Image: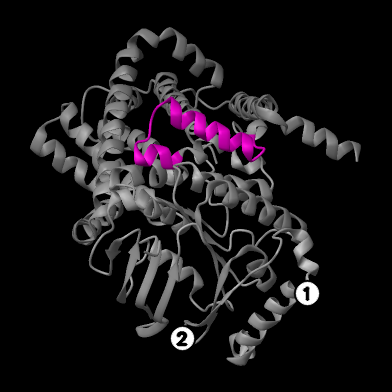
């Protein structure tokens, strides 16, 4: 049984009294412990897909199945399922009135997860992310990279089984992004968590994922998926022949449906 | 260069700001004194600041019960207004149909000049504290409500999305996200309400009533006791300034943005 499955999912938005088809007949599967990237041009509905999975927005049609629980546009998802998912936003989305530690522990407060065990786990993650020194500061004193790191820790503090990441490192400089990617891979290997990672950066998708779903625009749809088998998943893979081939394949797939139209 | 750094030093920090304010106030009082003495203005028209301060000290025992009555009504009315304004804003935020029904009436209450309804309140409720209290609440709660609701509505959608992602309850969303995010806007309304509450109370006392600083100002003016009348005006201003500063202090403690 797949960890996450979307069948025939469509989403329409109302824009200026006109219906806009953002997603059309999305079908995808993610296995347990898999690292999947969804890659495509801006505006193709990548972020909408993980918001539908996380039940932040409802699909217009189709069903989503997560960990054996099915939901659609009429059924709310059970609270136990919410706890199995962690969401990382494009920006760190830390609350400026809370300290870094309070921000990180916010999901524990919302889910009512009290006790020493949870506090210790939060401290462990803060320490692991190298944020012990800044945990009692307010977010305004953090760099963008550190803020984003806090956003990732917050998404993991309640021990989710699925991590949904919406272009989390898109606003970082190249060097910081590479470092964060490597750290994310370490976390994934250690925890065995299932990850869906949204990006428009093809090389990032190839470096990180075991499978990449390729999306096209107007309307947003999946045009294919590619299984990525790299011998190594670290920065040295960037110069690997297969890495370049995968990037080229995805680039041509997106280009074949008219990248110039998307841009 | 030296000139600009001296100007910066004068107004720098809390103490610097206070020093500039005190110096400005001293200059205004000195000018007042010079003009009254220089032009030989009679006391029944405008007393010197020294006579007013003298009256503030000498007539304190006479003025104190009225100061107490005014401040009690203002504080009570203010707290009722904040509680009512905030609670209604929360209700409206979560129930759009309720909001669409009652918001026009709240807007109307902001527009109607208080002075037009105080005589009616006195007619219905008498010259006691009830009419004044209602006047204070009617004047100050709409501004709390409108500012609070506007601030709730302008909460960053991404911050709300985090709450949606965690499937937070309405109570959790309000407590952990909406209220803290809206706090600066709420305090703008609360501080305006404090000013309006004092204006409403003194206006009501002037229109009708035997107690309160407003009533005393009218009484002293009728007997040409201008130093005492001005002493009441000064006490009113002093109370207003202290009230406002206290709220600013609370705001600084609560708003961490």
Q: Position of residue A130 (x, y in %)?
A: 67, 38
Secondary structure of residue under mark 2: loop
What residue is at 64 percent from the left and 41 percent from the top?
A129
Q: Is B178 or B99 nearer to us in this picture?
A: B178
Q: Is B134 or B104 nearer to us in this picture?
A: B104
Q: Is residue A243 magenta?
A: no
Give the vertical position of A86 relative to B101 (above or below). Answer: above
- Residue at numbered disc 2: A219
Give the vertical position of A193 relative to A121 (above or below). Answer: below
Mark 1 Cα within 10 Å, few/some/many (few <14, many 20+)? Answer: few
Give the vertical position of A173 relative to B55 (above or below). Answer: below
Which secondary structure is most common in the magenta stretch? helix
What residue is at 72 percent from the left and 72 percent from the top?
A243
Give the residue furthest to the left. B124
Secondary structure of residue under mark 1: helix
- Residue at numbered disc 1: A241
Give the residue furthest to the front. A231
Q: Is A200 or B197 nearer to us in this picture?
A: A200
What residue is at 65 percent from the left and 69 percent from the top?
A206
Q: Is residue B238 left or right of residue B3?
A: left
Q: Is B93 or A146 nearer to us in this picture?
A: A146
Whether residue B186 can be seen here: no
Q: Position of residue B247 (x, y in %)?
A: 45, 30
The quarter of the picture where the C terminus of chain A appears is bottom right
Q: Position of residue A245 (x, y in %)?
A: 72, 79
* Residue numbers of the magenta segment: A106-131
| Occupied quadrant, residue B100 | bottom left
Q: Is residue A128 magenta?
A: yes
Mark 2 Cα within 10 Å, few/some/many (few <14, many 20+)? Answer: some
Give the vertical position of B89 relative to A21 (above or below). Answer: above
Q: Is residue A62 left or right of residue A205?
A: left
């Amino acid at each position: 049984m797949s960890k996450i499955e979307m069948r025939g999912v469509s989403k329409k938005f109302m824009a200026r009294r006109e219906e806009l088809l953002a997603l059309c007949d999305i079908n995808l599967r993610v296995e347990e412990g898999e690292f999947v990237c969804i890659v495509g041009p801006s505006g193709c509905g990548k972020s909408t897909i993980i918001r539908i999975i996380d039940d932040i927005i409802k699909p217009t049609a189709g069903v989503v199945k997560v960990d054996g629980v099915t939901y659609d546009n009429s059924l709310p998802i059970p609270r136990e399922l919410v706890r199995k998912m962690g969401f990382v936003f494009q920006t760190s989305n830390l609350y400026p009135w809370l300290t870094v530690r309070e921000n990180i522990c916010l999901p524990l407060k919302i889910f009512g997860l009290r006790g020493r065990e949870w506090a210790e786990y939060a401290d462990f993650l803060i320490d692991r992310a190298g944020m012990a020194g800044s945990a009692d500061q307010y977010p305004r004193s953090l760099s963008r990279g550190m803020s984003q790191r806090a956003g990732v820790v917050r998404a993991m503090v309640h021990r989710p089984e699925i991590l949904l990441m919406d272009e989390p490192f898109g606003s970082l400089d190249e060097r910081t992004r590479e470092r964060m990617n490597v750290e994310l891979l370490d976390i994934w290997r250690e925890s065995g968590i299932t990850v869906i990672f949204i990006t428009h950066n093809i090389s990032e998708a190839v470096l990180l994922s075991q499978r990449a779903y390729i999306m096209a625009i107007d309307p947003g749809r999946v045009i294919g998926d590619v299984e990525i088998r790299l011998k190594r998943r670290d920065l040295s893979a960037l110069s690997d022949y297969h890495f370049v081939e995968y990037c080229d394949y995805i680039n041509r797939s997106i280009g074949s449906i008219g990248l110039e139209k998307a841009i | 260069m030296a000139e600009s750094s001296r100007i910066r030093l004068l107004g720098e920090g809390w103490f610097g700001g206070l020093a500039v304010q005190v110096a400005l106030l001293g200059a205004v009082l000195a000018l007042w004194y010079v003009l009254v003495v220089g032009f030989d203005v009679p006391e029944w028209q405008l007393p010197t600041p020294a006579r007013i301060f003298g009256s503030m000290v000498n007539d304190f025992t006479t003025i104190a019960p009225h100061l107490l009555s005014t401040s009690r009504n203002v504080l009570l009315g203010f707290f009722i207004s904040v509680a009512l304004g905030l609670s209604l804003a929360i209700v409206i935020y979560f129930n759009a149909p309720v909001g669409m029904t009652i918001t026009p009436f709240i807007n109307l209450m902001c527009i109607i000049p208080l002075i037009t309804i105080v005589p009616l309140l006195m007619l219905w409720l008498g010259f006691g504290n009830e009419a004044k209290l209602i006047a204070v609440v009617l004047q100050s709660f709409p501004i709390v409500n409108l500012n609070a609701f506007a601030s709730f509505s302008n909460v960053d959608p991404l911050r709300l999305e985090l709450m949606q992602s965690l499937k937070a309850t309405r109570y959790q969303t309000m407590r952990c996200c909406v209220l803290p995010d809206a706090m600066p806007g709420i305090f703008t309304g609360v501080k305006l309400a404090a000013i309006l509450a004092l204006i409403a109370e003194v206006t009501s006392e002037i229109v009708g009533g035997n107690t309160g600083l407003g009533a005393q100002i009218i009484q002293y003016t009728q007997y040409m006791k201008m130093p005492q009348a001005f002493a009441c005006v000064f006490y009113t201003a002093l109370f207003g300034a202290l009230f406002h500063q206290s709220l600013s202090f609370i705001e600084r403690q609560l708003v961490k943005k």
